[in-house]
Amino acid sequence: MSQPEAQGTGACGINCMVCGLMRQGKCSPCGAGTEAQAQAKLAAQLRLMGSVCPILQCAVAKKIDYCSASCEVYPCRHFMSGPYPLSSAYLEMQVRRRGQNKPAAPSAPSRGHGDKGTLH
Ligand code: SF4
Ligand code: SF4
């Protein structure tokens, strides 16, 4: 279960509440994969762009609040394939410090067809 103070933080870990695009009304917060906010964001992405963020979609499907905190295969290929939302250097640091040898595959194939590069 996500903590109340984290509301508005996307499943990927990006804090939408401090993003200027959100504050200027140009984007809506993503939310944790276990929150209704995430479902609303996926619906908005589909309506406005015709595709959804595969990270957010996967987290919702797996009932994962935040990928880094709760998913055993983080950082999976949804992250490592980039380009958004985190840099390869940051992700490689996560892999190294978690003692992993290589990024893990998502445990279930994504139904997403979104290109993360177009969702920000
Ligand atoms: S990658 Fe972007 S669209 Fe996907 S959950 Fe993170 S902030 Fe939201
Ligand atoms: S498989 Fe990847 S995108 Fe899906 S919940 Fe785990 S870390 Fe997040």
Image: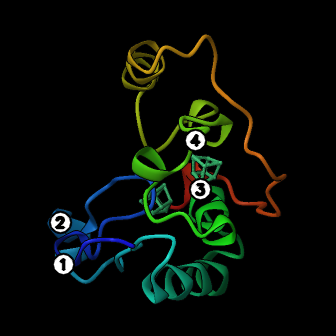
Q: Which residue corresponds to mark 4? A: 72
Badge nearest the viewer, 2 or 3: 3
| Quadrant where the C terminus is found in the figure | bottom left
Residue nearest the observer in this picture, 72 or 10 = 72
Which picture quadrant has residue 15? bottom left
The x, y position of residue 33, in whole percent, is 51, 70
Q: Are marks 4 and 1 in contact (CB under 8 Å)?
A: no
Q: Nearer the viewer, mark 3 or mark 4?
A: 4
Does label 4 or label 1 sit earlier along the sequence? Answer: 1
Specify the amino acid type for callout 2.
Gly
Q: Is disc 2's CB within 8 Å of ligand 1?
A: no
Disc 3 target residue: 55
Ligand 2 neighbours mark 3 (CB distance < 8 Å): yes
Binning the other alpha carbons within 10 Å of mark 4 as few (below 14), some (14 to 19) or many (20 upward) gives few
Q: Is mark 4 within 8 Å of ligand 2?
A: yes
Q: CA distance from mark 1 to mark 2?
A: 6 Å
Q: Is residue 103 left or right of residue 98?
A: right
- Give the Cα separation between the discs numbered 2 and 3: 21 Å
- Mark 3 touching mark 4, by CB under 8 A? no
- Location of residue 47 in the rendering, given as x and y in whole percent from the top left corner: 64, 87
Q: Is there a contact, CB below 8 Å, between mark 1 and mark 2?
A: yes
Which label sits on residue 20?
A: 2
Reading the image, the residue beneath label 1 is 24
